[in-house]
Each structure stands twice: as C-alpha cells, then as structure tokens.
Amino acid sequence: MVLASFVTDPAFRNVLYILSFGLFIYGLSGLTGPKTAVRGNRIAAVGMAVAVVATLLVDDLNNALIILIGVIIGTAVGVPAARQVKMTQMPQMVALFNGVGGGAVALIAWVEFRSTDGFTDVPTYVAIFSVFAAIVGSVSFWGSNIAFAKLQGIIDGKSVSIGPLQTPVNALLALIALGCGVAIVAGQNDEYLILTLLLAAAALGNLLVLPIGGADMPVVISLLNAFTGLSAAATGVALDNTSLIVAGMIVGASGTLLTQQMARAMNRTITSVVAGGFGGTVEAIAGAEGADGGTVRSTSASDVAIQMAYARQVVVVPGYGMAVSQAQHAVREMAKLLEGKGVEVKYAIHPVAGRMPGHMNVLLAEADVPYEQLKEMDDINGEFARTDVSIVIGANDVTNPDARTKPDSPIYGMPILNVDESQSVIVLKRSMSSGYAGIENPLFFNPKTSMLFGDAKQSIADVTEELKAL
Amino acid sequence: MLITNLSILVLAGFVGYAVISKVPNTLHTPLMSGTNAIHGIVVLGGIILLVEGDAEGILNDVLLLVAVVFGTINVVGGFLVTDRMLDMFKQKPEPAALPEGESS
C-alpha cells in the first residue's frame, strides 16, 4: 500500500517526466555521429516508454480498455509499416507518421473543448494553447497527407495551383480559423466554432501543400515536422505536462532548423516555397527554351566504363532519379569495381538532393557505401576541378550551371554542385525531359558532357558488366 | 504554473536548437524521423484525458481512441524506422556476396 501511494504520487510522476525528457535530449545528442546514433535513438525510445508508464501511474485508472485497444491497433499498424517500407520511400513514410501525430494533436484539442464545455472554468491560457494546437495540428495532418499522396504518386507531384486566388483564399481560411479561435478563447462555447476552426485549418493544410512541387518537398516536410512539434508543445502547456512541452519544443526547433537549412540550400525563402512559385514561373521559361540549341552527345555503357576505369578520381552525383530506379546497390557495386582498379570514388551529396533532408545518404548507407566517402557540397565543390569523371545519376537541378551564371533563371543563386568543372561529365537520364522543376539544364549541352540514356539502375548494371570485362 | 511551463518551453526550444545544430547533413533523414517519433509523445495527451475520465460520451471516447491510435503509430513506427535506417549507417564488415543490383 505504501508503495502504491508512493508510485501514484504526482511528484513521482513528475520526476519520471523529467527523466523522460532528459533521455530525449541525451538520445538526440547521440545523433551527431553515425557510431552513437543507433544507441541515441534507442535511448529516446526508452524515454518515451518512461513517459507513457508515468502517465498510467494514477490511483484510479479510467478507460484502461480504450487505451489498451488504441495502443494495440497503433502498434499493429505502425510496426509492419516501419518494417516493410523501402528506403526509397522514406520521405512519404516520414510524412505519414508526421501527419498522424498532427491529427492526434487536433483530436485531443477537440476533446478538450468538448469535455470542458468550451473551456469554461479553465484558465484562459489553456484555451489559447489548445486553440493553437487545434489549428496547427489540423494544418499539419492534412498538409502531411497531401505531401504523402504527392510523394507516393497518388496525386500529381507537380505544382497544382488554383492560380492568383491562392494567397487570398489561404489568408481567408487562416482568418476564419483564427476568428473561431478568438471567439472560443473569449468564452463562446458553441461546438460549431471548433468544428469550423478544424475544417478551415484542414482546408488550409491542403491548399498550402498542393501547390508545392516535388523539388521543394525537403523544405515542406521539415516545415510540417516543425508544426507538429510546436502543436505538441502547445498541448503540453494546456495539459500541464512537462514531458510533452520539452519533447514538442525539441521537435519544433529541429524542424525549424532543418527548414532553414533546406531553404538556404535552394536559395529560397520559406515564404516563397509555401507560395509555390517554382511550378508557375518555370513553365513560361521552359517554353522559351531550345533557343540555346546546343547538341547533346549520347554515349554507350562501354565508353563510360573505359572512361571511368582509366580515371584517377570519379565523383558520383546522385539525385532523386537514383531513388526512383532503386539504383543505389548497383552504384555501390560499380564503385567497388572501380576501387579495385585503383580509382578513387567519392559521392557528392547536395543538401536538397531527393525528397527530404539527407535522403541520398540513407540510400547510399543502405547500399553499404562507407560513411567517409559521402561528401557534403562545400567539401566536394573544390575537388571537381581535379576530378576526371563526374557521373550524375538522376540529378538535375542541383547541377545546373544556370544557378551560377543566368540571373533570370528561377534557380539563380541556388548553391549547386560544380560538376561542370570536372574533366568530363556523364549524365544518366531516362530521356531528354527537363528536371522536376521544369528548367532546362545547360550542363547537358556542355561539350564535356555525354549522356547515357535509360533507366539508371539498368545503365549502371550495363556499365558494371563492361567494367568486369575490361 | 503557466510561467514555469513557459520557461520550460523557451529553454527547451534553445536546447533543441543547440543539440540539433550539431547533427551532420548526412544524418538528417534519421534525425527527422527520430524527432518525428518523439512528437508522437502527443499520445500522452490522449492517454491523460482518457485516464482522468472527464471526457464522457461515445464521441469523446472514439475521438480519443483515434488519437491514441494515431499517436502510437507515430511513436512505434517512428522509432522503428529510425532504428532500421541508423543500423545501415553502422560500419559493417564487408559482405562476401554483393547484394542485389545484378539485375540484367
């Protein structure tokens, strides 16, 4: 009995919460290096378990059955999804997990509204933070679902826009949601208010992400991640739970930081990404193309093999195309053969290559590429000048020299990989269509460049066969 | 209470920023999916409301059940997938046979 009353003491619970967020922070600081990262993640998971157990340590546990059923269903859905997802599909998986988190936040805020009769008899700040959580959670849930649908190819990944009305409509929806929120905080307790708020935020979430093209996805996913984190922190303040506050804020900070870094890597502001400018402006420019009129040189797998076999240094530049054709294992095999012939192989990773921050690193790690060979943009850019062959696999916009030289290009000013400085460039590409952003890439017309058309994985496999035969 | 919580909120924001800014680009995907799992902690919010039992009625129960399901998916799926990913970043001994990739 003494033990029971000790365990269910609120002070003991709070100590467990402190322990849990301590474990979150300690675990996350392990993510700074590949050696400590696995352990760090597990430590954070232990922190989560501690927090959940702490919540259940109360004198009279109501609704235990509902909680149990919820946890069982959630586990039954989450575990197979996490086990089976392919590394190439990681961006959509993260978007989906992020979305359900946001959805949970919005639902919790809704129930709080209902159970307190529209926040009567609770401090005003509870109402304020709950309303904030409801709006942001709902935006995050629907936004993440759209991001998932785009990445999964359920809806068109390109920019879908409702034209010039976009910004006014978004502003109107935001105003509706805010207006309902203010009314709720001011003491109105009509349930239609919270429903309208949730629906307006839902529509806003949809409309915010729909116009965003695939190349901007790393920014959007980071942003939605930050949103869910902040809304979780707000829920924590409303429920007076320190563990929720700290965990939510850490995620909020991490998401914000990543969003900034991604936006900087594309030389775009977060607002311009959200406004969805890329898709719209680009089409006009792509239409006026062909004036450059350069010729494209096509090459064969055996030529590529010979060129690389006699190089001193080869730099592999992977992009989303490598993810799509799942070519990472084939690339690794080719690199091993080259290394066997004394060629130095490095990988140049642009921060926004792929569809989420660090996407390419995960794929190459899956294929057992040594961590040290993965070079970040700033480290590798100085090396292209003494690189014999750069092989660009399904990357496009991140190698586009227009970003340096052509002020009227939509990507002007974006930091790129200076692939064109190497002795020769080989571009693996499905066809001559332009990149995701729809921008023509003069690199393809550069006399140093030769193109190897076809599916990336198949092309790499062909080159590998030729290398073996050499 | 509010002031204490707000202090925690602000400090946690800065701690998060400081810790995360040390993570290299290479590990950004696992970082994102790891923090993603951590915000699944909102499952606590659903559990707290259920445990307190103030929210009565079938609709409240259903909404909270969905919230707990969502939160659990977020937590369990998030940590597992991060673990899988990070496992690949560990240096492995060179495998004798080459995996996949030899499709012809």
Image (cartoon, rainbow, N blue to C red):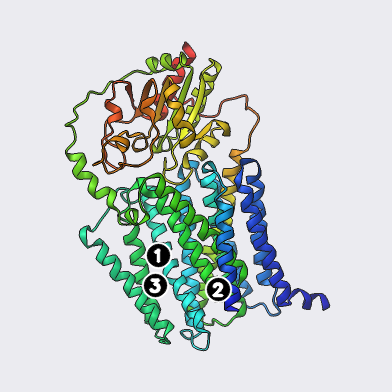
Front-lying residue, B41 or B5 = B5
The mark that comes first in sequence, 3 or 2, is 3
Residue A434 quadrant = top left
Disc 3 and disc 2: Cα gap in Å? 20 Å
Check residue A139 in the rendering and tell me which mark sits there, or answer none. Answer: 1
Residue A465 quadrant = top left
Check the residue under mark 3 and report the chain it is in.
A
Looking at the image, how many numbered discs can be counted on the residues? 3
Task: From the image, tell me which residue sits under label 3.
Answer: A198
In the depicted structure, whether residue B53 falls above or below residue A17: below
Crowd around label 1: few <14 · some 14–19 · many ≥20 (10 Å): many
Q: Secondary structure at mark 2?
A: helix
What residue lies at 59% left-to-right and 50% top-to-bottom? Answer: B80
Look at label 2 and name its amino acid.
Val
Look at label 1 and name its amino acid.
Val
The mark that comes first in sequence, 2 or 1, is 1
What residue lies at 70% left-to-right and 63% top-to-bottom? Answer: A19
Front-lying residue, A10 or B22 = B22
Report if residue A8 is visible in the image.
yes
Name of the residue lying farthest toward the bottom: A121
On the same chain, marks 3 and 1? The answer is yes
Q: Secondary structure at mark 3?
A: helix
Front of the two marks 3 and 2: 2
Task: From the image, tell me which residue sits under label 2.
Answer: A237
Check the residue under mark 2 and report the chain it is in.
A
